[in-house]
Image (cartoon, rainbow, N blue to C red):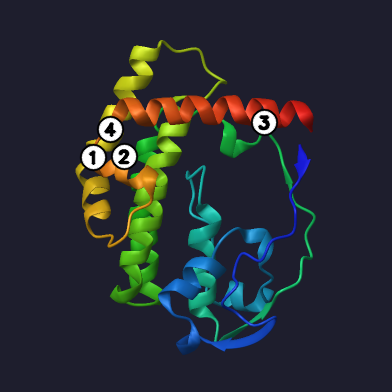
Amino acid sequence: GYEQPTIDSIPFLLPESLLSKKDISPITLRYTAGAIWRALYRGDMIRHNKLLFPSNLPLNEDRIFNICAIGCSKSVYYLKQPLYHYWINSGSATAKYRENMLDIILHTQSLTKEALLRHWDASYVPIYEQVNLIDGAMICIYNAFSPTVKMAFQKRYKLVQEIVCHPEIQKALQSKTELNYKQKLLIRKQSMALCLFAMLRNARNKLFFKKH
């Protein structure tokens, strides 16, 4: 693994912020309800609301839990201070090849939408559709080119084609007003270019981990 430099992942919040639920906009929730290791909750609040991590979901289960937990809280205190020593490991669960990754991403979006409608309201759904489906599409493409599994290029290419042509992903892309270069490749269904991008990313990561 390697040590990740300290970065300000939520620059629009003050170093110390006490936020009531009404202060938490969709964009604020999107950034605060991330990995579980960045949050600390009262045990009685979790028990009272019977909050559980979604079962049988190998990825993003902590994001869904945080959406529910913050939604059940009267207020949250944000501290812009690193309290967790985070390491990135090339053999972690997020780096593992998953044959059904697209299904996982779509199921994640379904559970996320359900949590948002239960604990927040419909105005919070669009930003998560973009996060889960558009970012999820790139995760699926990286997964298709995972170096941890032996697979012919033709099969990897076919997986990428299925991802970029999926109607839910295209719908999410069309709802976005601004697209970065990877998202432009997605909406234009440039499968070969995305394959090459994933291969270059693997080569860069391999070199990086060798150095660290």
Q: Measuring from the top left, give residue 17's x and y in whole percent.
A: 64, 85
Which image quadrant for residue 184?
top left
Asked which secondary structure carries label 1, the reply is: loop
Q: Residue at x 51, y 45 (%)?
A: 59
**Disc assigned to residue 91:** 3
Mark 1 sits on what residue?
188
Circle 4: element type:
loop
Packing grade of label 2 (10 A; few <14, some 14-19, many >=20) is some
Q: CA distance from mark 3 to mark 1?
A: 32 Å
Circle 1/circle 4 CB separation < 8 Å: yes
- Image x and y of residue 203, in percent: 58, 24
Residue type beneath disc 3? Gly
According to the picture, the residue beneath numbered tag 2 turns out to be 185
Question: Do residues under tags 3 and 1 come within 8 Å of each other at their CB atoms?
Answer: no
Horizontal side, residue 5 vs residue 139: left or right? right
- Look at discs 4 and 3 and give the one toward the viewer: 4
Is 190 or 65 nearer to us in this picture?
190
> Residue placed at 39% from the left, 66% from the top?
115
For the residues bearing labels 2 and 4, Cβ distance under 8 angstroms: yes
Element type at marker 2? helix
Image quadrant of residue 11?
bottom right
The number of numbered badges drawn on the structure is 4
**What's the CA distance linking mark 1 and mark 2?**
5 Å
Q: Are marks 4 and 3 in contact (CB under 8 Å)?
A: no
Badge 4: few (under 14), some or many (20 or more) residues near its Cα, within 10 Å?
some
Which residue does the image show at 74% across and 59% down from the upper left?
Answer: 6
Q: As shown in the figure, which amino acid type bears the numbered disc 1?
A: Arg
